[in-house]
Amino acid sequence: MSDSAAVYHATATAPVNIAVIKYWGKTSTKLNTPTNSSLSVTLSQDDLRTLTTASCSAQFQADALWLNGAPHDVSNVRSQACFAELRALRKAKEDRDPSLPPLSSYKLHLVSENNFPTAAGLASSAAGFAAFVRAIADLYDLEETPTELSRIARQGSGSACRSLFGGYVAWEKGSRDDGKDSIAVQVAPESHWPTMRAAILVISDAKKGVSSTAGMQSTVATSTLFPNRANVVVPARMEAMKKAIAEKDFETFADLTMADSNSFHAVCLDTVPPIFYMNDTSRSAVRIVEEMNRCAGENIAAYTFDAGPNAVIYYEEPAQDIVLGVLKKAMPAAIGWSDKYSKIEAKLPDGFNGTLLGPLEFGVSRIILTSVGSGPLKVSKVHALIDQEGNPK
Ligand code: DP6
């Protein structure tokens, strides 16, 4: 029996993920299926997460979403695809058990908040759509596995399918025409490689770049380097990366991560007209990581860049003093050097070419020091972001 005044709700969080083998290019814009598989690391939700309350009621007039306090459009095909798929799963459940309240026929209110600056361009669509799907699946009491839900989240935003898991996650591109096998799977849990760390350098950029959706379409249509990347380079790298992760082989993990970031930005440059996501500060971050590795005589850090200028640097905990020592020397005033890192001495390794540091000091506004984290989490109803009427608190 349903209660016509009742507001049903569930709250969940989802993490940000940063790819080490990049997704870039679609075979179908309708299904949002990728031209190549990709692999990412899920970052800790202590530092980066989206919190979403999904609610529904016979009283609600229309589907609606509020993001960080502001109303947000849900009429776009991507949100609509996610709503339709989740409602169909709930409807099938109600058909099997007619005593369930008919939530699939109610309008939805979603309220979402990020614990990090959304404007900083930090993969917020991945965490956003993953939390959206997870919270509605919880509201509907769906039994589908995270991999099954990843097929839905993919239709919201490709990279979102990887945020349904913690640890190390592959998005297998699939081969079916209906996209049903284009799904995410966990390659290793977050506990697998406990020493892995990430430093995110938030690099201020006044210019608004090309969106990843538009950018990748234009790369597929015009880049002559792209087919080789999608069909030859990435398939081999996916296998090598899975092996490097299984063996906790940082040397290879770092080689592959840096090479794949550079390959992705190379096909962007090869796009007509060319797309530039990295800027001078980004390139400085590349140089100092290369210099750290040269001084160490091995890879102690690996950079990667998405569709924007921010650098993500992966490193292992035993190298923390060296890696963060260089970053502190380069950008002592950046926001984000919390007390936890007060003992890190701002210092360059012997032989480090200090002239490389210059551009980072003014180009980086914030550093986020984080680690590998879990997949989406259920949150107690007391933390719901809606009031009793189902509107944002
Ligand atoms: C460069 O997932 O934002 O971050 O599917 O069009 O929403 P849409 O694209 P999106 O693309 C992310 C691209 C990337 C690489 C990656 O995360 O793999």
Image: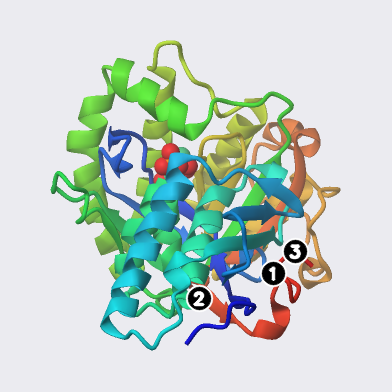
Q: Quadrant of residue 180?
A: bottom left
| In-image side of 133 versus 46 (left or right) | left
- Seen from the viewer's position, the closer of residues 20 and 222 is 222
Name the image quarter holding the C terminus: bottom right
* Residue 93 point in image, percent of width and height: 32, 78
Q: Residues within 10 Å of mark 1 (few under 14, many from 20)?
A: many
Asked where in the image residue 353 lies, by quadrant, the reply is top right
Instruction: In this rendered view, identify the residue nearer to me: 296 or 271.
Output: 271
Q: Are marks 1 and 3 in contact (CB under 8 Å)?
A: no
Please state the quadrant of the image where ligand 1 appears: top left
Q: Outermost residue, top direction?
A: 273
Residue 165 position in % (x across, y down): 42, 69
Q: Which mark is residue 392?
A: 3
Q: Confirm or deny contact between disc 2 and disc 3 (CB under 8 A).
A: no
Q: Name the amino acid, label 2.
A: Leu
Taking depth in this image into account, of 329 and 214 the one nearest to the observer is: 214
- The residue singled out by tag 2 in the image is 139
Residue located 39% across and 49% down the image: 81
**What's the residue at 75%, 34% (across, down)?**
363
- The CA span between labels 2 and 3 is 17 Å
- Where's residue 256, x and y in %? 35, 47
| Mark 3 crowd level (few <14, some 14–19, many ≥20, 10 Å Cα) | many
The residue pinned by badge 1 equals: 390
Residue ID at (45%, 66%): 105
- Residue 376, compared with residue 159, is above or below; it is below
Badge 1 element: loop
Mark nearer the N terminus (1 vs 2): 2
